[in-house]
Image: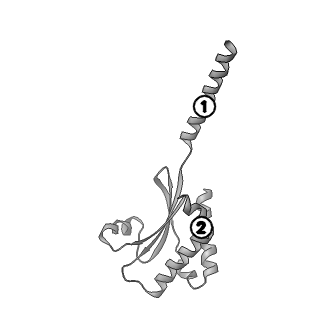
Amino acid sequence: MKKIFFSFSALWLLFAFSTILTAQEKMVRLDVMYFHATTRCHGCLTIEENTKNSMHSLFEKQLKDSTITLTSIDFLQPENEHYQDYYKLETQTLIVSKKINGKEVTWVNLDKIWEYSGDYEKYKKYIKEEINKLLKN
């Protein structure tokens, strides 16, 4: 009887310990947000297209499981104006926000998107490097 009780107790402790570890795991998510004005030029549309294509070719799995999200936001719309001050937006901008357990812990302005907008391969490499830095930290 003692062996059965001991086995049951050991299993219960193992289950409880694994539950505690699972509860303490951090849920990390990156939100990739392309902020644009209401009126958009060819360059702005190209940046949005480069971003979408890069993200889908590089991070398809993470987009599907929502580890990474991708959105396009008109920062001039009244409901989005708060982003202007928070992220210090002055023009079309690509922001990557890192959230742990739903709380933003850091964010990065990928300010070279304009510099690389005419060269898709450089653009894609830049996005990949920057996002991977945030995923590793």
Residue 7 versus residue 122 in the image, above or below: above
Q: Residue at x 59, y 67 (%)?
A: 130
* Residue, far right: 3
Mark 1 vs mark 2: give the one in front: 1
Depicted 56 relative to depicted 4: above or below: below
Q: Secondary structure at mark 2?
A: helix
Would residue 18 appear left or right of 48 to someone viewing this image? right
Q: How far separated are the C-alphas under marks 1 and 2?
A: 38 Å
Question: What x and y, as percent, mark residue 90?
Answer: 40, 76
Which amino acid lies under the numbered mark 1 shown in the image of this protein? Phe
Q: Which residue in the protein does label 1 denote?
A: 15
Toward the left, the furthest residue is 78
Question: Which numbered disc flags the more N-terminal residue, 1 or 2?
Answer: 1
Q: Splitting the image into 4 quarters, where does residue 132 fall?
A: bottom right
Q: Position of residue 63 (x, y in %)?
A: 55, 63
Do we see residue 112 in this rendering?
no
Assess disc 1: are there few (<14), some (14-19) or many (≥20) residues with their C-alpha within 10 Å of its C-alpha. few
Query: In screen coordinates, is 135 left or right of 87?
Result: right
Mark identifier at residue 34: none
Residue 55: x and y, percent? 57, 70
Q: Residue at x 52, y 81 (%)?
A: 114
Location of residue 82 (image quadrant): bottom left
Assign a secondary structure to mark 1: helix
Looking at the image, do the residues carrying marks 1 and 2 touch, with CB atoms under 8 Å apart? no
Determine which residue is flagged by label 2. 130
